[in-house]
Every structure is written in structure tokens, then in C-alpha cells.
Amino acid sequence: MENLIALFNFGFFRNAFLAALVASITCGIIGTYIVSRRIVFISGGITHASFGGIGMGYYFGFDPILGAIVFGIMSALGIEFFTKRADLREDSAIAMLWSLGMALGVIFIFLTPGYAPNLMSYLFGNILTVSEGDLIYLFILAVFVISFFLIFYRMIIFVSFDEEFALTNNAPVRLFNALLISLVALTIVLNIRVVGIILVMSLLTIPQAIANLFTKRFDVMIFYSILFGFLGSITGLTISYIYDIPSGAAIIFTLVVIYGLMKTGFIIFGKANLKYRENIKG
């Protein structure tokens, strides 16, 4: 225990701890929205499409994360446009932008002069390499996401879960859908450093799946998602440091184990409770 506490003497571990906290907050809120609206597949398309921005960042010499942000938001809005106005099936639009982003990323990285960049931290994440600059971006995102959901909570629920009724009441459905999908893209891209492109969807869905075992209420689900996301992130971070394994993979593995244990507990408790009721009736 003392050795674990001593880790906080290191700046990189403090940064990783804060990144885990902020990532849990942003992914807890946005992930609950994603899961509740059943748009996980759309988010997966945005995640992989953002790889094109990373490749362009390396080729043109600017911050790859900045490129991923621009490309991610454009992909998110592109999916909204093609599915709502261009009469294209949603899965087809997602597949096209998904493959386009990955293809452009590979092409630009291949064309980048000099040594090929190490993409492991972008693909699989490494929370131990999170810098103070990354933390600033994450904190700004967290403040914006929290403020947006607090101010427009009722409108978000109204637009998200009863869109047709919202349209008949002249609610700004298209505007809020565009803002929310852009927030999804921002959250995905800025958390790539924590768990990577391949695994970021797990951070947006597994804590929510655990939370869903306890509640169906949107606001309560957000709280539990943040709690379990942080618990899994810190535990996975510690495991990755002790055993020298990739942090992103360790975090996701920990979250899956937590879900498995919780689900098993609910099943056992449910059967025991049912048997107890049957014995009382008998």
C-alpha cells in the first residue's frame, strides 16, 4: 500500500490519476447518452474515422490530436448529414466514413518523410504518457460537457428520447443533435490518449453496462458510470504499472472483470431471492 501511495511522488502518475478521473467524468456522461440512444455503432465510426486526422497531423506537421478533433467532428456531422438529408442508410454512411478515415490515416502516415511514427499510444492508449497539455484539454472538455448537460438537461432528454414529439413542438432538434454528436466526437478524440482508438468505445460502454445493472434512470446512470469508470481506470492503471503492461488494455480488462463479477452476483442473488420467496410461499 505504501508503495502505491509513493507512486504519487512521480509527476507522470499524478497526471495519469487526474486523466483517469476526468476521463471517467466525460466518458460517464457522454457514454450514458450514447448507450441510452443506442448509437454505439455511430460512435465507433467516429472513433476510427478520427485516425485520418492523426495521419494528416503527422504528414502536415501539426498536432495529430488536433487533426483527429477536426476529422472526428467532421465525420460526426457527416454521418448526421448523410443519414438525415442525403437519404443514405446509417450503417452505410458509418462504414464509408469509418473506412475513409482509416485509409487516409494509413496513406498520410506512409507518405510522412523520415521514420514511421509510433502509433501504439494512439491505437491502444498509454495513460502514463498523458502530459499536462493533454490534461488541460481534458479539463476544458469536462467543464464544457458538465455545463452543457446541466444547463440543457431537460432539452437533451426531450430531443434525444422523443424526437418526433420534439419536432412537433418546434424544439431545435437538428441543432441539439449536431451539438451532441460533436460532443461525442470531442470526447472520443480527447480520450484517445487514455485508452486509444481501438479501446475507447469500451470506456464509453462498459461502465454504463455496469451502471445499468443498478438503475435505468438517466441521471443516476451517469453517476454510477462515472464511479465504475474511475474505479476500473485506477485499478487498471495500477495493474499496468505493477506488471508493466499496456495501460489501456489493463483498464478495459479490469472493467470487463468488474462487469462479469457484478453480473454474476446479480444472477446468484436473483436466484437466491427467488428460491427464498418460493420457500416462504411453500
Image: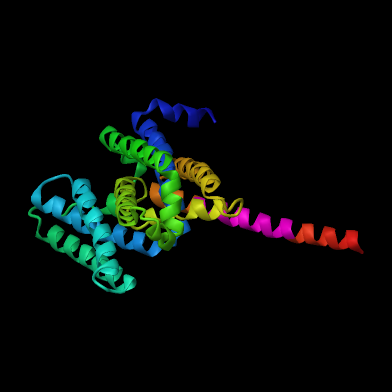
Number of disc labels: 0
Q: Is residue 225 left or right of residue 42?
A: right
Q: Is the magenta stretch mostly helix, strand or loop?
A: helix
How is the model colour-coded? rainbow
Q: Where is residue 34 in the image (x, y as percent from the top left)?
A: 42, 56
Along the viewing direction, whichever of 140 and 136 lies nearer the viewer: 140
Q: Can residue 206 be seen in this view?
A: yes
In this image, 110 relative to 31: left or right? left
Magenta region, residue range:
255-270
- Position of residue 156 in the picture relative to residue 140 (left or right): right
Task: Work out which quarter of the rendered image holds the N terminus and state it.
Answer: top right
Q: Which residue is drawn at 40% across and 39% down?
A: 151
* Residue at the spot 25% in from the left edge and 53% down from the top edge: 73
The question of residue 199 being in magenta is answered with: no
Q: Quadrant of the C terminus?
A: bottom right
Any part of residue 34 in sight: no
When asked about the image quadrant of residue 16, the answer is top left
Residue 266 shown in magenta: yes
> In the picture provided, is 79 more to the left or to the right than 168?
left
Residue 167, picture quadrant: bottom left
Find the residue positioned furthest to the front. 169
Please name the residue shown 47% across and 40% down the image: 234
Residue 212, picture quadrant: bottom right
Residue 61 picture location, percent across and down: 10, 47
Q: Where is residue 270 in the image (x, y as percent from the top left)?
A: 73, 59
Q: In the picture shown, does residue 234 fall above or below 85?
A: above
